Image (cartoon, helix red, strand yellow):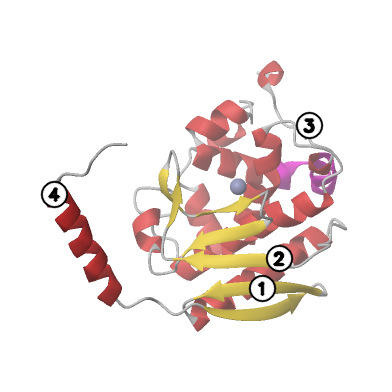
Amino acid sequence: MRSIPFNAFIASSLICAAMAFLPVPTIARDTCIAADIDIEVSAATRRERELVCAGAQQALDLLALCGIRPRETIDVRIRPEVRHPLAGLIFGYYDLGERRITIASLDGLPGLMDGTPYAGLPPTDFYKSLVVHEVVHSVMHQNLGAGVHTQASYEYPAYALQIASLPGAAREQFMKSFDSERLERPIPLNDTILSFAPYLFAARAYNHFITSADGCLLLREALQGEIDIPSDAAR
Ligand SMILES: [Zn+2]
């Protein structure tokens, strides 16, 4: 066990003492009901709780169009910031083990949107779309018939429906960030594109979904673990 230098000990003690007097945001819990399922939301502000309920309702409405319904309570927690162990601050995530959604606070959103193709979108529109993304993960997970074979198959429904849920003007603004020829080019929608160009993956997933002959079939395929989306072989 390493010893802590005395100065560092004093500094860490002072930080702890200071933190003891910092105001701690009060987290209130609300429950809203959508598609006969409880959506449990814990968030610091009423506005966040309203946006989560509206976003969850929108996600459940979109999934219901394809006959996909939630089976259990959806737990959504809003935190001042959400950190990925490797990627730093992120918008949010769905925890497969805990079956829980965590999303960053509305206040922290503009900073996270800066430098991304989401910058400039109305924050509340984008916030609801984030909720849609994570609720789609949750409901798809509740209905999974098999394990997910690829990360791309897991993310495709969430991104396609997230972008579909944006109001027309916001969606158009997001899609304009990408060269239309690049969106339609038959490049793969695979784990590599997802890792290195997640925003392009989101735009292409939406474009592929709305131009496909049967979007619901794609979502049902996702429930079986693998969607028929352009792969390396389609290049
Ligand atoms: Zn996702």
Q: Which residue is mark 3?
A: 228
Q: Tell me the distance, in whole angstroms, between the alpha carbons under discs 2 and 4.
A: 47 Å
Marks 4, 3: nearer the viewer: 4
Q: Nearer the viewer, residue 119 or 20?
A: 20
> What crowding class fits label 4: few (fewer than 14 Cα within 10 Å), some (14-19), or many (20 or more)?
few
Q: Position of residue 206 (x, y in %)?
A: 64, 46
Query: Which of pointers 2 and 4 lies earlier in the amino acid sequence?
Result: 4
**Residue 13 higher or lower than 36, as above or below:** above
Query: Which of pointers 2 and 3 lies earlier in the amino acid sequence?
Result: 2
184 sits to left or right of 61? left
Query: Which of pointers 1 and 2 lies earlier in the amino acid sequence?
Result: 1
Q: Tell me the distance, in whole angstroms, between the alpha carbons under discs 4 and 3.
A: 60 Å
**Residue type indicated by callout 3:** Asp
Numbered tag placed on residue 6 in the rendering: 4
Numbered tag placed on residue 232 in the rendering: none
Q: Check residue 124 for magenta coloring.
A: no
Marks 2, 4: nearer the viewer: 4
Q: Which residue is mark 1?
A: 40
**C-beta proximity under 8 Å, tags 1 and 2:** yes
Q: Which residue is mark 2?
A: 74
Q: Tell me the distance, in whole angstroms, between the alpha carbons under discs 1 and 2.
A: 6 Å
| Residue ID at (61%, 73%) | 41
Q: Position of residue 35 (x, y in %)?
A: 81, 72
Task: Quarter of the image for the C terminus: give it.
Answer: top right
**Residue 146 higher or lower than 7, as above or below:** above
Q: Which residues are magenta?
A: 208-221
Query: Which of pointers 4 and 3 lies earlier in the amino acid sequence?
Result: 4
